[in-house]
Amino acid sequence: MPSPDAIAADANFAMIAQAWAIAAQDAAAYLHNVEIIATAAMGMALEALARGATGGDQTQVLRAAQTMVANAEQNLQQICTQAGEALKEFPHAP
């Protein structure tokens, strides 16, 4: 039978792992939402270009949308990396 300390360590590890999993899930949802917004913005900019718009606004919108998605992807990657490192270093029972 495991010792009370081992049981507590395992329970703590499980709670920390769950918290990181929720953080990663939230970051993935954020990425999904940003992709929806970026797709809509890109569609509007491309439509304007297809209709003959010549201003630089459409190009700026396309760049901004790409940057939004790249930042959200980086956010997700950072959170997942931090979660892995934190869980690897967290003391828990074997």
Image (cartoon, rainbow, N blue to C red):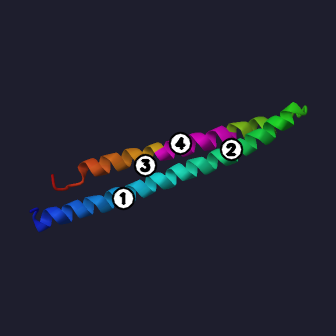
Q: Residue 79, labelled with which disc?
A: 3
Determine if residue 25 is in view.
Answer: yes
Q: Is residue 4 above or below residue 73?
A: below
Q: CA distance from mark 1 to mark 4?
A: 21 Å
Residue hosting label 2 = 38
Q: Residue 83, labelled with which disc?
A: none
State which tag comes first along the sequence, 3 or 2. 2
Q: Residue at x 79, y 39 (%)?
A: 45
Determine whether the residue tagged by mark 4 lies in a helix, strand or loop: helix
Residue hosting label 1 = 18
Q: CA distance from mark 4 to mark 3?
A: 10 Å
Q: Residue 73, labelled with which disc?
A: 4
Q: Over which residues does the magenta segment extend? A: 64-76
Determine whether the residue tagged by mark 2 lies in a helix, strand or loop: helix
Badge 3 crowding class, 10 Å Cα cut-off, few under 14, some 14 to 19, many 20 or more, is: some
State which tag comes first along the sequence, 1 or 4. 1
State which tag comes first along the sequence, 4 or 3. 4
Q: Is residue 21 magenta?
A: no
Q: Label 3 is placed on what type of residue?
A: Ile
State which tag comes first along the sequence, 1 or 2. 1
- Which picture quadrant has residue 56? top right
